[in-house]
Image (cartoon, helix red, strand yellow):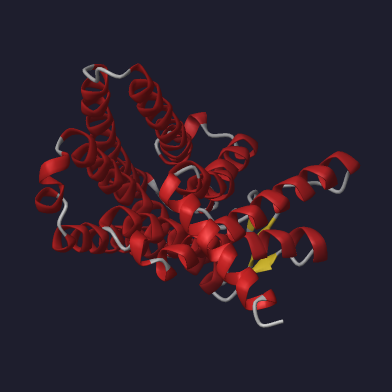
Amino acid sequence: MMEARNTTSDFILLGLFKYTQLHRSLFTMLLTIAIASLIGNAIMLLLIHQDHQLHTPMYFLLSQLSFMDLMLFSTIVPKMATVYLTDRKSISPAGCGLQIFVSLTLGGGESFLLAAMSYDRYVAVCHPLRYPVLMSWPLCLQMTMGSWILGAADGLIQAAVTLSFPFCSAHKINHFFCEAPMLVRLACGDTSFFENLMYICCVLMLLIPLSLILTSYGLILAAVLRMPSTDARKKAFATCSSHLAVVGLFYGAAIFIYMRPTSYRSANYDKVVSVFYTIVTPMLNPIIYSLRNSEVKGAVKKWLRKCLYLKYGQN
């Protein structure tokens, strides 16, 4: 007979890697990617904050994306590294709930933020003369606040409901962080209502923003095809394809984790797929959306010249 867990007992994170040579190499590679993500997003935040030429709605949205990715790094990567390096696998119910809340808040917020960024690009490409009106600062701030609020509401609901279940005696989570679908597997009670609720939340938080993104980029590509310049078309296609690749990686991984039926779930597959939207995509975001941009490159050069002047100019 299954035993309900004590509400004060800790969960055990089994982690992502084993202690073999191959897995040590994979851990090192993943940690390098995570640190690169941290550095890239921190640089983007610094540049956008310091360079007044980047104080536009587009770069404000990019700064929010970098901030979300930095918070996601802080929520997941330190605990993942601690579990592997020190073998301290336990995490309290409060810590587990915090990971669920923060990761879902950031994931849901980023989902809507990517939709807002696609709208910004649509207006910039298809209606450049009306950009100040169609993408005004008040609208930009409203979309940003809406992304945070909707993400936080989703995170709060799912974290509260997930931790309200009576969990069985085995508290082992076969994952590298607390993720709602993984905890639901440990529940002793009937979870069908929550799984239906999770599915509805995913439709609202993932499929609706994704449809808006695909619509925006579809209109952008239609406008690009009408451009007379071949070079302009190639540049626009390269930009759109790279943006859509990152969007596909983020939404594809999130949909795979949260919208599959329970009978098709595999813990090992889920762990690998979760890496993409929690660690790999945050590394790609500053590269794809920002560091390839000529204005950002100019800001980087200006910042480096300023640093060199401060270091050698007074000598």
- Residue at 78% x, 50% y: name it: 28
Work out whether residue 314 can be spotted: yes
Q: Residue at the right extreme?
A: 21
Residue 25 falls in image quadrant: top right
Residue 128 placement (x, y as % from top left): 17, 40
- Residue at 56% x, 48% y: name it: 283
Which residue is more in the foreground, 216 or 227? 227
Which residue is more in the foreground, 116 or 302? 302
Q: Residue at the bottom extreme?
A: 314
Residue 147 placement (x, y as % from top left): 28, 57
Numbered label tally: 0
In this image, 28 relative to 254: left or right? Answer: right
- Residue at 48% x, 46% y: name it: 285
Work out whether residue 3 can be spotted: no
Residue 156 falls in image quadrant: bottom left
Which residue is more in the foreground, 213 or 91? 213
Which residue is more in the foreground, 142 or 209? 142
Residue 289 placement (x, y as % from top left): 43, 44
In this image, 17 relative to 295: left or right? Answer: right
278, above or below 11, in the image: above
Q: Quadrant of the C terminus?
A: bottom right
- Residue at 59% x, 44% y: name it: 275
In this image, 22 relative to 295: left or right? Answer: right
Residue 282 placement (x, y as % from top left): 52, 50
